[in-house]
């Protein structure tokens, strides 16, 4: 570890990798340090849906920049990406109201309203399930188990030094102290998702960072047709700020809580994505705390399977895998903190790391090294608290 770097990054998930991509593009020397042996955290335990359209404000700017970076990286790093958009399946009139209001605000380029028949043309929902829907053409899909590891391999092949299975014990200006020795760098980025409290507990506490456990499943199911895009539901509309801030969203939230208390109690966001091999990802329910219990309730799995059966009119569903993702959660969507000169602690704390992380990272590197703006100037500089 005797080499000096322009940038040292603690954390090999998608946000850390995004900083490495941004630095490499600017001709900087980069080291990435991670305690795991490979990418295995939230960056591979998600849907692979890059939900560009539903973001607002700062998140939307980061997402739009990230979209361009994802498209470029999929070619350079050689991983599967689909420009499929996403489809929202509305199952009640108030869900249609939210979609209509969002479309009125954003316009037909971002949101294309669908009739029930048009929903059926795109997504094999059961008879009578959809009262309408929307296509969100800007959204993307990747295979989450493939994309981030492929980016890491590409970075490694292009001169980024990775120190896997290396625990970081401390960070200060110009230095990262690890279980294998010291890494020296002009600037340091700490991008450890939910584990900010392990190195900077004061920053985690001041910003209200908790851990959010996500219950997810992979199943084998006989759909009438393959899914042409990721599928969102009315529950998803309450999570994505672009929809959640429409005038009709509060009424939808109240109606779902009253009529459907089980997913409400499990803090569910019911959505569905089909991997390239045909397996179906179901998710997800959420639970937050300073720690997340490793013991997953079977009620969450039962809910996910039951709702998939109802939406798609399925018979037999064979469960292939169950897992728990863990993300950072906080009142704000992003944390960018400066605990010391030329040190940044960066985390996406709103559950949208895959969607926005590459864009956020690009802006942080801009700010650290005072380089020219990236693809979209609208994103602005990353916040520093």
Image: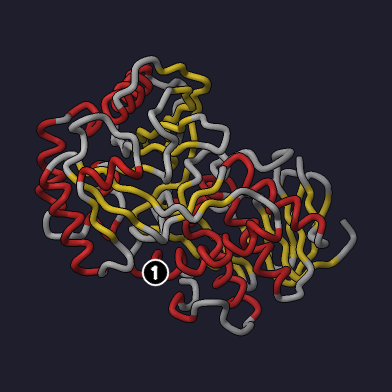
Residue occupying image coordinates x 32% and y 43%: 121
Is any part of residue 124 visible from this angle?
yes
| Residue at x 74% of width, y 38% of height | 37
Relative horizontal placement of residue 110, taking residue 29 as reference (left or right): left
Residue 375 drawn at (x, y percent): 55, 77
The reply, left or right, for residue 127 in relation to residue 301 is left
Q: Quadrant of the C terminus?
A: bottom left
- Judging depth in this view, the residue of 146 and 295 nearest the camera is 146
Using residue 344 as the reference point, say whether residue 376 is left or right of it. left
211 displayed left or right of 233: right
The picture places residue 367, in percent across and down from the top left corner, at 58, 77
The location of residue 286, given as percent across then percent down, is 36, 35
Question: Residue 355: x, y in percent?
Answer: 47, 56
Q: In this view, does 275 lie above or below 229?
A: above
Quadrant housing the N terminus: bottom right
Question: Which of the 4 quarters of the picture holds residue 125?
Answer: top left
Q: Residue at x 50, y 45 (%)?
A: 48
Q: Which structural element holds mark 1? A: helix
Q: Quadrant of residue 302?
A: top left
| Pointer 1 residue | 58
Q: Is residue 202 visible?
A: no
């Amino acid at each position: 570890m005797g080499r000096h770097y322009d940038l040292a990054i603690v954390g090999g998930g998608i946000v850390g990798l995004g900083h490495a991509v941004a630095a490499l593009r600017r001709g900087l020397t980069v080291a990435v340090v991670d305690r795991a042996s490979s990418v295995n955290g939230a960056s591979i335990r998600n849907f692979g849906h890059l939900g560009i359209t539903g973001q607002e404000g700062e998140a939307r700017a980061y997402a739009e920049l990230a979209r361009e970076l994802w498209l470029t990286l999929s070619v350079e790093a050689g991983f599967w990406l689909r420009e499929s958009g996403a489809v929202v399946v509305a199952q009640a009139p108030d869900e249609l109201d939210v979609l209509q209001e969002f479309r009125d605000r954003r316009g037909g380029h971002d949101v294309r309203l669908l009739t029930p028949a048009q929903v059926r043309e795109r997504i094999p929902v059961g008879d009578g399930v959809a009262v309408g829907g929307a296509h969100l053409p800007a959204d993307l899909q990747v295979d989450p188990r493939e994309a981030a590891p492929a980016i890491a391999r590409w970075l490694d092949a292009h001169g980024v030094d990775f120190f896997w299975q290396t625990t970081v014990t401390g960070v200060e200006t110009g230095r990262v102290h690890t279980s294998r020795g010291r890494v020296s760098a002009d600037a340091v980025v700490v991008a450890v998702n939910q584990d900010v409290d392990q190195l900077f507990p004061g920053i985690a506490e001041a910003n209200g960072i908790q851990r959010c456990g996500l219950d997810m499943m992979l199943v084998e199911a006989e759909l009438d047709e393959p899914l042409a895009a990721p599928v969102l539901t009315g529950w998803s509309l309450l999570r994505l700020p672009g929809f959640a801030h429409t005038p009709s969203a509060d009424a939808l939230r109240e109606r779902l809580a009253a009529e459907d208390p089980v997913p409400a109690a499990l803090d569910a966001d019911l959505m569905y994505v089909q991997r390239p091999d045909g397996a179906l990802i179901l998710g997800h329910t959420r639970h937050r705390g300073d720690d997340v219990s490793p013991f997953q309730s079977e009620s969450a799995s039962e809910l996910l399977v039951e709702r998939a059966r109802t939406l798609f009119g399925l018979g037999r569903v064979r469960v292939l895998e169950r897992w728990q993702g863990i993300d950072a959660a906080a009142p704000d969507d992003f944390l960018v903190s400066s605990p010391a000169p030329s040190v940044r602690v960066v985390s996406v704390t709103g559950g949208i790391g895959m969607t926005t992380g590459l864009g956020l990272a690009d802006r942080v590197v801009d700010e650290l090294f005072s380089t020219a703006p990236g693809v979209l100037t609208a994103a602005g500089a990353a916040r520093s608290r």
